Amino acid sequence: MSSATELTDLTIVQGRDGLRAKAFTAVDLTLAHLHAIEALNPRLNAYLSVGHAQAMEQARAADAALAQGDMRPLLGIPLAIKDLFCTTGVRTTEGSKILMPFVPPYESTVTANLLRDGAVFLGKTNMDEFAMGSSNMTSYYGPVENPWKRRQDATAVLVPGGSSGGSAAAVAARLAMGGTGTDTGGSIRQPASFCGLVGVKPTYGRCSRWGVVAFASSLDHPGPFARTVRDCAILLGSMAGHDPKDSTSADVPVPDYEAACERPIKGLRIGVPREYRADGMPGEIEALWQRGVAWLRDAGAEIVDVSLPHTKYGLATYYIIAPAEASSNLARYDGVRFGLREDGEDLRDLYERTRAAGFGAEVRRRIMIGTYVLSAGYYDAYYLRAQKVRALIMRDFTEAFAKVDALLTPTAPSAAFAQGEKMDDPITMYLNDLFTVPADLAGVPAMSVPGGLDADGLPLGLQIIARPFDEATMFAVAAALERAAGFVALPTLRAGG
Amino acid sequence: MAYALQGRTGSWEVVVGLEVHAQVVSESKLFSGAATAFGAEPNTQVSFVDAAFPGMLPVINRACVEQAVRTGLGLNAAINKVSRFDRKNYFYADLPAGYQISQYEHPIVGKGEIEIECADGSTKMVGVTRLHLEQDAGKSLHDQHPTKSFIDLNRAGVALMEIVSEPDIRSPDEAGAYLRKLRSILRYLGTCDGNMEEGSMRADVNVSVRKPGEAGYRTRCEVKNVNSVRFAMHAVEAEALRQIEVWESGAEVQQETRLFDSNRGVTRAMRSKEDAHDYRYFPDPDLLPLVLDQAWIDDLRVHLPELPDAKKARFMRDYGLSAYDAGVLVAEQTSALFYETVAKGRDPKVVANWVTGDFFAILNKLGRTFENPPINAAELGAILDLIKDGTINGKIAKSVFEEMVGRAMAPINVSLTENLSPSDSFSIRIDPLTIVDEMGYRQLTDTGVIDATVDKIIAANQDKVAEFRSGKDKLFGFFVGQVMKATQGKANPALVNETLKRRLT
């Protein structure tokens, strides 16, 4: 049997092969991760709840199945689940106080798919409240510490990004082999970039939203985190698929993403959108982008300059549409049927007390914005206009993809920042989503791959954006980048580290 | 003569538009699999979708869409091949999601029309503006506990069709005719049971008034949730009279939502325009646009049942019925079917007279409908056959009919029913000929007996005979009456007439 540290360092592919080869058991693998969580989670606060008993039971079942020669793709692989995936009988909080006493009696389609394929769930991970944030600072249950440290200042506590900060920190610190997140404005790709991980936002409709607590329905994309492109390909292959319970789920076959990682990219046309050259973007991010371009060119791709002219309207559009949908989606948290209730004098008083006590400042801000932009007299100027701009942003991508097979951009305009930084003004925080938001608005698949480190030794991600439902090409490009980048740096805080 | 209300300043015209909420007949709700049956225990027909649990998503129920399209076709309306669902946002305890899914800008059905029949027999077309699908809310029960309200979500999410008319209605009578006709069409189609008492059909009545000849409309008020045809008609008049008083006092009618107080026969304010909710409508991002296939629509059209207007035209054409009789018979599918069953192989006008006359009267008297008539179509037909073959005359037939109904309704011997629960009902079928024989109702056609009776009557009334012969023709009826009386009404009327004529002249 391998040592516990070696087990937590394994990729999903290595774990899967080791389990099948009987090099170790699923119980070994799960225990190693549970021990790592015990050691590190009190500091990182990545998990909000850890399901020891359930995880061990799933691991034992996996071992029994492995003994029978069961070849399910995720059999015995321990994962971290963002706490907005409803999991039967397991507390689901959305990072909010308002859902504190909520235990769903149903399993989300995405987590049900992972369980079907044999996965072991270690626990539910921290997140920005209702997925609203880019730092994990808005969680009612406290911030998450990024396991990466600045070389010069190891004492600064950095954010893991958000909103899926808990899953990102957990996978980076080796407290899980992979994890789930949701990406509404960049909530998978930005934390992946901040934590040196691969994070995938698939095409809208690829992964069912059924059982995923809604933030902004037309923008919410469930997707995976892992430490390699191939691991993400395996996870997405399991999570994806048509679900009749979600009317926006697409009835499109799911190809073999793992196989797609081996595809050569020679002859592919890669677009470099000039609008992603943001003012004030650190030089090292620009430099990394150029390195990425060179790596793909060296791998045989043809580089094409393209234009996505409406990119600059992406953030403004997003911060109208997402709050508008959220203001409606979050109306159900009213204290009447589930979650927190603060009794009042009458119905209106009950609503006001419950929602004032249950929602944090950022959620309240977005509900206010969303209510405003949908109000009579403002709807046309804000919501309707934003929908029109959204259509233009989609058209930008359609036109670009007439010329190229995929796009390459930086994932985020900065590396991980410290807790407390960028907190003075919500707009500064919103700028984190600059490069990620357009793909959410357009629904096209996009992912982040670690490209290198900045001068502080912090990871920086490169983003690949592909045609709708062409995640296979995206994985092929991502795998080529991964091979060229040779990213081997490790976070300071990690199991056995 | 157009309907008008008289005020101090002269006469006023009434302008009415109706919004009808019709509960769709379907097994399950508009966006969930929960059942829709009326009268279940509270909160027993609620899915996680209906209760708006986190992460739950709506999925459109194809059967409800089909019902809406069939209704649209029945209203001769344009079917919109692309429609959309919007969210209507407001907070209330019986609205779990905090929004109702409805169709705001792009309804599934566009313009159509309904032909109504007015009391004077004239007909009129009333435009239908649109029909859209939406969810019903749950029910708040405020009288179950001193300090709490109880919520029943059984109805939450049930599919409703909102059917909006143009402001083409000009009187309470037309409003009533519109509602009855719409209900009749919905029942024919089986898309709504039209049961206003159970709330499966409710009307919002929009009323304004104006001077005859005035162009454009004045400010209207909406009288919400009227739950019977009669109340809707009362509400139109009461609200119109109120508005006339406001205008004539020199004030202006304010746009507002009102309620009809059926006990006092007046409307009262519910909320003003200023207090109106801002519903913040926007397209529901959980649902894709609803796209319908033309072939599917065409198939639904082909399989529509014969609707009241077509049936009425056919009854007039094929049976030679008057517009009035045909209209009465086709109001319900069951009455039309009953009529056609009896009319088969018989004189259609005679049958129409019997069904619209004696049969409707007895149903009203007994509180029954054509779904549970005291005697069935075959039995009524058998009575009419006895007239036709001369066994009884028309007058005696009414006695036979009453006797049959009486026997059918009579309590059944206890020994026969002891194994039956009170809900079981059946009646013993009785052959009318048996009654005729038992009661001695057979028609008297023996000319010898009739001659003798006539002679007896003439002999006993010589003074009247003299008067008749001197030109007082009216007295003929007196002699007929005397003969019929003497034969207990059983004499063949034609023979009596003929014999009397022969002997008196």
Image (spheres, coloured by chain):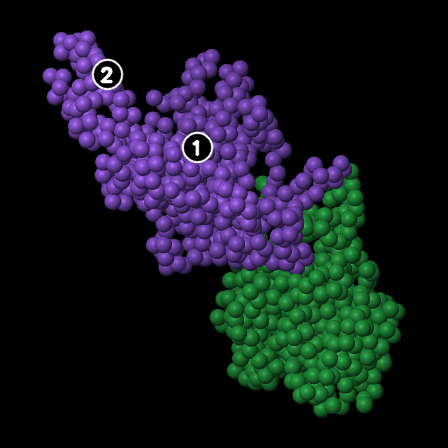
Chain colours: A green, B purple
Q: Amino acid at mark 2?
A: Phe
Residue B138 visible? The answer is yes
As drawn, A154 above or below B14:
below
Label 2: chain?
B
- Chain to which the residue tagged by mark 1 belongs: B
How far from the left and from the top, in percent, is residue A444?
57, 67
10 Å crowding of disc 2: few (<14), some (14-19), many (20+)? few
Pinpoint residue A337: horizontal percent, then vertical percent.
Answer: 71, 50
Q: Secondary structure at mark 1?
A: helix
- Which residue is denoted by mark 2 in the rendering? B478
Residue A282 appears in which quarter of the rendering? bottom right
Q: Would you say A99 lies left or right of B320 here?
A: right
Identity, as a three-letter code, of the amino acid under mark 1: Asn
Foreground residue, A432 or A92?
Answer: A92
User: Residue at horizontal 77%, vertical 85%?
Assistant: A25
Quick one: SS at disc 2? helix
